[in-house]
Amino acid sequence: MQYKKEEQSKWFWLNKFLPNVSTVFKDKILISIKSRDELKLFVVKEGLYNVLKKVKKSPVYVGFPLLTLKNNEPHFSLILAEKYAKANRKRVVVNAFGEEKFLYKRNLMKKHIVSFSKDIKKGDLVVVVNKRNEALGFGKALFSSNEGLPEGRVVNHIIDRGFFIHH
Amino acid sequence: MFSDFIKSRYKDIFGSKAKLILKEFSKEPKKCIRINTLKINPKECLRRLKLKGFFFSRVPWSRYSYFIEKEPKAVSATVEHLMGYFFIQDASSLLPVIELAPKRTDVVLDMTAAPGGKTTHVAQIMKNEGTIVALEINKNRMDSLLSNLERMGVENTIVLRASALKVKQLGLKFDKILLDAPCTADGTMGKNQRLRISLTNEDYLKYSRKQKELITAANAVLKDKGVLIYSTCSLAPEENEEVVEYAVNTLGMKIKELKTKRYLTPGMTRFFNEKHSSFLKKCGRVLPYQYHTQGFFLAKLIK
C-alpha cells in the first residue's frame, strides 16, 4: 500500500454525486491510499499530516475516510454521510419505523418518509436521516422531488450504520 | 469449574482473596458503556437510553462511563450504539487512558490498538486534536479497529499495520505511550470460560517474556520524561509486577503513583515466596469482586 497527497481540485467531480460535497474537504489535506483493487481517500488535518510525513511506513487509515473508489465508482463513507447531512441537501427524513427498517438493510417505502429535500432527482444518491437529523446511511432515490413520492418503494438501501456491527 | 492448576495458583498468589476472585469469575462481569463525548452529551445519551428502559449506575473513576444495571434489549443493537454515541467495554479498561491523560498537543502511541476501545477513548480525551499512532498487526482485528474508529468519529489517528516489537523502525518518538500488552487474559475468566481449564504455567512464562520485549520496544521510542502506561487484563505477577520491575531495574524507567489508586489494590511486593521491590506498591490491580469487572492491572512509568 502506498499513500499520496492529493490535489483537491482533482476530486471536485464528486460534486456530481452529492452537490457541494467538496465543502466537506475544502481547505483540508486529502490523502489517498491505494491497494491492489481500490483507492481510499481520507481527509487529514495539517498537524496529523505533519506527523504522517515522518512515519517510515504507509498507513492503512488516517484522519477520517471520505470514500472508497472501486472501478471508478465512489462509495462514500458513513462519516461523510454524517457531515453531509448537515448540508441539508439530497436528504430523506424517515420516521422511527423507517429508521428501524433501514438499519436492517431494508429499502424504504412511502410510509417511512417524513420529508425530503427539494433537489432530489430519480437515481440520485441520498443521505437517509432520522427525525433528529442523524445520518443513518446512503440510499438511491427512486423518485424526483418535483413529482412527489410514488406509492410503494421510494429509496433503495445502499449502506447503513448497522454496517459497523454486521462488518 | 477451574483446573487444579488455577485453583492452587490463585491460592498461592492471593491467599484468602482467591476464593472471592474465583467466585466472581463464575459469572460474567458487569457490562459498561463509555459515552463518546466527541459526539453526544452524556446526559442526552443516558436520557435516550433510559427512555428505552435501560438503567445505569456511574463507574466511580469516570464521569462519562456507566454500568448497565438493566438491559431490556441488547445495548449493542440500539441506534445510539450504531451512531457511535458509546463504546461497550469493561470498566477496568478505562483506567489506562484516564492515567495516560493525553493532552491535545501530544503525539500518542497505542501499541496494540484493536478493537479500538482505548484508541477511541484517547481521541475522546484529546478532543480529536493532536496525533494518535495506532498499531495493529492482525488483519482480522484491524477490521474491527477501523470500523470502530469510523463509528466513533475519530479523526486524529494514523493506523499502521505493524508489529509493536518493531515500532522503532517507524522513526517516531512519542510523548505518551499506551501498552495494553497481549497477555494470558486470566482476568477475563468470568467471560472466557475456556481459560479456566486451559491455562498452563508455560502460558504465563511465554507472555511474561513477550511483555518484557514489548516494554523494551516502547521505552526506545518514548521521549525523555514521556509517560508510558503499562496494562494487562491478567492478574498474574509474572505478567505485571515482574515486567514493571524489569522496566525500572533494567531499563531505568521511573514508576509514578496512580491518580486512581483509591479504587485499586496496590501492586504486590511479595509473590511466589519471593520479596520484590517496594516501589511495586505504586502499581494498581482491579480485583474482579471489587466492582464486578474483569481483573486488571496497570502501572505508570516515566522515562
Image: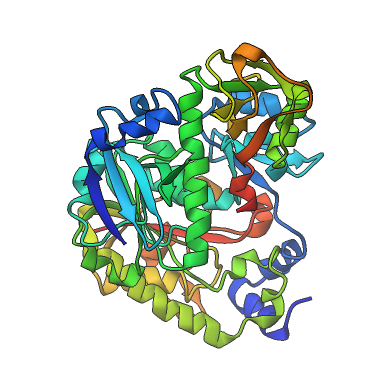
The relative height of residue A52 versus residue A106 in the rendered view (above or below) is below
Question: Who is closer to the viewer here, B155 or B57?
Answer: B155
Which residue is at a point 61% across and 25% down the rendered structure image? A129
Name the side, left or right, on which A41 lies relative to B241: left
Name the side, left or right, on which B205 lies relative to B3: left
Point out residue A70 in the picture as x, y percentages from the top left corner.
Answer: 44, 51
Question: Who is closer to the viewer here, B17 or A164?
Answer: A164
Would residue B55 be seen by someone viewing this image from the given angle? Answer: no
Question: Who is closer to the viewer here, B71 or B160?
Answer: B160
Question: Who is closer to the viewer here, B30 or B111?
Answer: B111
Point out residue A111 in the picture as x, y percentages from the top left corner.
Answer: 78, 22
Which residue is at a point 70% across and 63% down the rendered structure image? B191
Point out residue A131 in the picture as x, y percentages from the top left corner.
Answer: 66, 19
Query: Looking at the rendering, which quadrant does residue A130 occupy?
Result: top right
Which residue is at a point 56% across and 12% down the rendered structure image? A118
The relative height of residue A151 versus residue B294 in the rendered view (above or below) is above
